[in-house]
Amino acid sequence: MIKKRAFSLVFLFWLNIFPGYLVAVLPLSPEPHLRLPSAEEAPGSSEFGEATYTMIFPVSLSGSSLFFPVSAYNRINPLLFCKGSRHIRFSYWHFKRVRPRHFAVAAAENGVFTSPEIAKSFDFTTEERIYNWWESQGYFKPNFERRSDPFVISMPPPNVTGSLHMGHAMFVTLEDIMVRYHRMKGQPTLWLPGTDHAGIATQLVVEKMLASEGIKRIEMSRDEFAKRVWEWKEKYGRTIINQIKRLGASCDWSREHFTLDEQLSRAVIEAFVRLHEKGLIYQGSYMVNWSPALQTAVSDLEVEYSEEAGYLYYIRYRVAGGSRSDYLTVATTRPETLFGDVALAVHPQDDRYSKYIGHMAIVPMTFGRHVPILSDKHVDREFGTGVLKISPGHDHNDYLLARKLGLPILNVMNKDATLNEVAGLYSGLDRFEARKKLWAELEETGLGVKKEPYTLRVPRSQRGGEVIEPLVSKQWFLTMEPLAEKALQAVEKGELTIIPERFEKIYNHWLSNIKDWCISRQLWWGHRIPVWYIVGKDNQEEYIVARNADDALGEAQKRYGKDVEIYQDPDVLDTWFSSALWPFSTLGWPDMSAEDFKHFYPTTVLETGHDILFFWVARMVMMGIEFTGTVPFSYIYLHGLIRDSQGRKMSKTLGNVIDPLDTIKEFGTDALRFTLALGTAGQDLNLSIERLTSNKAFTNKLWNAGKFILQNLPSQNDTPAWENILACTFDREDSVLNLPLPECWAVSKLHLLIDSVTASYDKFYFGEVGRETYDFFWGDFADWYIEASKARLYHSGGTSVAQAVLLYVFENILKLLHPFMPFVTEELWQALPNRKQALIVSPWPETQLPRNTSSVKKFENLQALIRAIRNVRAEYSVEPAKRISAYVVASNEVIEYIAKEREVLALLSRLDLQNLHFTDSPPGDADQSVHLVTGEGLEAYLPLADMVDISAEVERLSKRLSKMQKEYDGFIAQLSSAKFIERAPEDVVRGVREKAAEAQEKITLTKNRLALLRSNVLATK
């Protein structure tokens, strides 16, 4: 506690740069009643030499007294203590003139940025202000000044109904990293954003909104409904865009697109017409995923399978013409589909049923309808009874089998999942209601044998949640095989690279076994299919494909006369159809002379989740080759899914969903981005609060490092000092070789890092970039060089060199980290002196800069020595502030470079500089010292008497040894007990053995330490 009377001995003065604050300069060794914070409590402070602390206290300007109330003492924040750089020595107290800083003023001139000299920590609320400033300066737009090849990414368009989730955060982070890196490399960069009209999702949202108003869609005209959807889109459609901006996405928003805007709609119609002209689009009745609630076909992607409890029903089918004992029992999970049975099938080698092959079976509850009994090798003899009922109208596998065997297709369902007239007395019943009623009647007639619990794999609509019905429906299809062949060749020829490489096999397998694509949807929101029919003609096989209604009418009039009337197909195209054109439709296609198309197509990278490799990515490749003659991008980068800390998929049911916006509020955008970017391509990432907390600390560490550097740079008005700093260059080999050891090490390590990180960026190894830069900044720069620099800044010469290296290394760290952590790095960059341009457009560091591997090795030897001394201090519980003696023993060559850095060694090891000796042989009292061997040819001796009170330490260790011996004896007694060994669980016995071994090891170490201490006592006597 700081006593009030202590301040009577201190000069108090005002500083204009800190209006409303009082500054006092206090010595490191104060009066006993005045407690100053430790080094840990005062970040950036040095424990070496006659140091001073600058203490900043808030005061009221309205009072008449310079002294503040006692209550203020308890509000002193230890983080406001900062290290002084120079002081004038008086007999006891030391006073320092705190120079006015101008960096903070420069950083805040435009009202956007805040300097670390002013702010205690990085303020997340400034992120939006920084983002708006970037955008207002036009930094997100491509710059062609350097005339290099452009770097282009098309953003995967999120649904216009969407709200930000961690999947969005992942793709925004990774794509922004790529874009910011290539922008700094000097390439014209275009990140083209936009949103998807999301046919099903949007229609559902608007239908719910209308329902809340008491309106049903079917009560409206199509045009009225479309108008309401557009109104909704204008009001709420930008939510997801604004949230993506919050993540720092440096997209060119002037080129933003929407899949239903005029340009893209024209591209969609053109694509349909061209594909139809080539005979690749056709109409037909085939099996699709049908959503009864939405009344539309849905894609495989929009079907989610869940394991749910159900039943396996056993039903008896009599053999026609046989006795009462001639029957086949079928096991099925959907008895209501038996009305659609067209055959029974058994395995040809199943002896139980071979005698019935070729006979007819009677379908129950159908008034005697007969179906053939067939054999097929694909029948699973182990499932149920080994007899398969074939209902091709309501099961994907049955449908394929029926087509192979030439069986008819019988549909028993209406579009709303009620049974139709084929079901006879059950017609009009809901499918699940019919199931219950049918089973009850089957049991009554003796045809229902039994039902038993069974886990079902139920297909449910991703949007509506209802059970999807496999249904044969008339739809529009796109023939995929000829398109897939070209997409396969693109990878085979190396025109397209998939990252990670293992997904090539999945890509090739899917395209090699591709099925035709159902591209029509029975919705009112989307791209209307450009097909027109003739009024009055029942045969819809006669249709006209045209680019617009006028062209369609003109063609109809040619065929059927001037009085003909036409109407357009009511269906819309699958949302994925327009998305498949995204990379080139957004750049102006089908106008291939459009400036953006000429400059930016083909694009460079397509980044997205691996889960939509088939549904979107492969289709873009096929469409791009088909319509432009080239692959739409050179690289496909696939990221994994975001899971919780336990590896579980995030879901509302589990309550483990982590909201990105909430995360940003608590940890900041930079911490979130850095956490997400540390994953590996294609692999799922487990996200935890612990990781976010750690990376928030990383942000603060960057901020504090910037604060330290700014506080130790000369005033911008100090021209001679700045001339000395700017005279230091690090791009020539001689300039690096002539640096003092710590500075040469720091610069060399930085140059090695730049090469490694740049190579990793180019290979898309973003996790490696993050880890390497993190390790260098925290492990090398902050923990070692900043601490070593204090020996220059506070106690010896070479200040300008240290300042130049601090500034040079830090500004390059900011550049390397900017793609990952754009906000805090830009804020720190703007606070540094002499900034000519924003960090976002600053040149990337050059590679192959000079480095001195010999100096790196030498400094590593010095580090090893310092670590060893620190470990001994900790082992002997030496007080942190206590300076101890040391003898460093090495060859003359090693001593030469170690001795040059004696102040660094003393500072970082807390050695007494006056009693730090360098020699080529052990000291005379070596047997009374702790001997350290830290490397080949480098040793140290630390006199015990200098570190501890030997007698007190002997007494303490003796007591500790006695306690440890009792614990060890207890473990041995347990292990000696036969009853314990026999009855205790194996893991418990193993645990006791491990504890006994650990205790024995500690006893041995303590005995050795006691022997050394006692020998020192004897030697002293």
Image: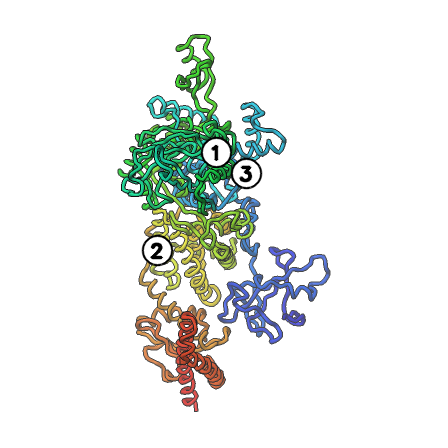
Q: Earlier in the sequence, mark 3 or mark 1?
A: 3
Residue displayed at 58% across by 71% down: 93
Q: Earlier in the sequence, mark 1 or mark 2?
A: 1
Residue displayed at 53% across by 41% down: 163
Measuring from the top left, give residue 147's x and y in whole percent: 36, 36
Measuring from the top left, give residue 86's x and y in whole percent: 52, 65
In which image quadrant can residue 238 be found?
A: top right
Question: Crowdedness of circle 2 by 10 Å Cα count: few (<14), some, many (20+)?
Answer: some
Instruction: Give the vertical position of 888 relative to 554 (above or below).
Output: below
Question: Crowdedness of circle 1 by 10 Å Cα count: few (<14), some, many (20+)?
Answer: many
Q: Is residue 796 visible?
A: yes
The dot on residue 239 is 3
Hey, what amino acid is under mark 2? Leu
Instruction: Give the vertical position of 164 relative to 686 (above or below).
Output: above
Instruction: Give the vertical position of 646 relative to 868 (above or below).
Output: above
In which image quadrant can residue 740 be found?
A: bottom left
Measuring from the top left, give residue 607's x and y in whole percent: 40, 41
Hey, what amino acid is under mark 3? Thr
Check contact, mark 3 vs mark 1: CB within 8 A. no
Mark-to-mark CA distance, 3 and 2: 43 Å
Name the secondary structure under disc 3. Answer: helix
Instruction: Give the vertical position of 330 relative to 811 (above or below).
Output: above
In which image quadrant can residue 748 be found?
A: bottom left
Residue displayed at 29% across by 43% down: 350
Residue of label 2 = 752
Q: Earlier in the sequence, mark 3 or mark 2?
A: 3
The dot on residue 291 is 1
Name the secondary structure under disc 1. Answer: strand
Question: Which of the two residues, 222 or 404, is positioned nearer the viewer here?
Answer: 404
